[in-house]
Image: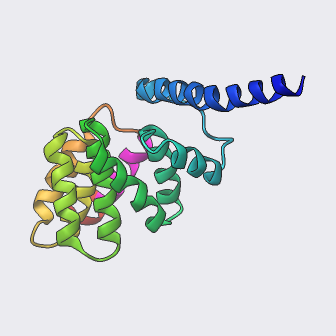
């Protein structure tokens, strides 16, 4: 009886990671419209899953966004950099580069920030995030203000733009338009 117990325990230990890998791999290959609800999962739990499965990029992005939204840029940066360096998915790479660019801008380095954001926009020319960040940065600089206004004004007419984002863009344009 004891022999069977150890056999089944060993079998479970070997099979469970394989099951977990394929299950999570399937989740990561789903479109972004069918993402897993992570609202009840803590950051620490997500970190543990990522530690065991570093290439679960949608979970990394979700966790990085949590850190980003709470201004914990050092933790967000780690995950966005990993995605930017390890994905072939242009959308994920562009998104990560735009987020990195904004964090760098927030740290006071406009030149480096724009290099990340420009790369994000180069990869995905219609990137709402990358173009929004670029427009916001440009509009604040008197030398590039007109180009920033043009970028943000163009974004205003994009039907994909969320209502909250449109409101922010309109508020920024009111501040800087003549």
**What residue sits 68% from the left and 25% below the top?**
11
**Residue 35, magenta (yes or no):** no
53 in relation to 72, above or below: above
Q: Position of residue 175 (x, y in %)?
A: 29, 65
Instruction: Looking at the picture, tell me which residue is in the foreground, 105 or 169.
Output: 105
Q: In which quarter of the image is residue 5?
A: top right
Residue extent of the magenta highlight: 163-172
The relative height of residue 41 versus residue 160 in the rendered view (above or below) is below
Residue 28 on image: x %, y %: 45, 30
| Residue reaching furthest to the right | 1
Q: Position of residue 106 (x, y in %)?
A: 35, 71
Give the camera-side residue of 92 and 15.
15
Q: State left or right for residue 83 relative to residue 9.
A: left
Q: Residue furthest bottom?
A: 108
- The image quadrant that residue 78 belongs to is bottom left
Residue 95 image position (x, y, % from top left) = 31, 46
Identify the residue at image location x=29%, y=41%: 87
Q: Name the foreground residue: 72 vs 89.
A: 89
Q: Residue at position x 46%, y 46% from top? A: 60
Q: Main secondary structure of the magenta part?
A: helix
Position of the N terminus by quadrant: top right
Q: How is the image coloured?
A: rainbow
Question: Does residue 99 appear to the left or right of 18 in the view shown?
Answer: left
Residue at point 88%, 28% (across, down): 2
Number of labels in the image equals 0
* 95 sits left or right of 45 in the view: left
Does residue 178 appear anywhere in the picture? no
Looking at the figure, which quarter contains the C terminus? bottom left
Can residue 16 be seen from the camera position used here? yes
């Amino acid at each position: 009886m004891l022999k069977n117990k150890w056999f089944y325990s060993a079998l479970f230990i070997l099979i469970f990671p394989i099951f977990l890998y394929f299950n999570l791999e399937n989740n990561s290959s789903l479109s972004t419209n069918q993402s897993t609800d992570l609202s009840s999962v803590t950051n620490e739990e997500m970190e543990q899953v990522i530690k065991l499965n570093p290439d679960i990029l949608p979970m990394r992005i979700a966790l990085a966004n949590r850190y980003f939204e709470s201004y914990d840029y050092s933790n967000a940066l780690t995950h966005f950099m990993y995605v930017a360096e390890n994905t072939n998915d242009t959308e994920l790479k562009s998104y990560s580069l735009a987020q990195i660019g904004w964090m760098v801008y927030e740290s006071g380095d406009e030149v480096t920030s724009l290099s990340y954001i420009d790369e994000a926009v180069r990869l995905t020319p219609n990137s709402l995030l990358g173009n929004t960040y670029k427009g916001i940065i440009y509009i604040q600089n008197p030398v590039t203000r007109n180009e920033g206004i043009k970028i943000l004004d163009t974004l205003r007419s994009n039907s994909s733009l969320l209502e909250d984002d449109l409101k922010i863009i309109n508020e920024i344009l009111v501040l800087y338009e003549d």
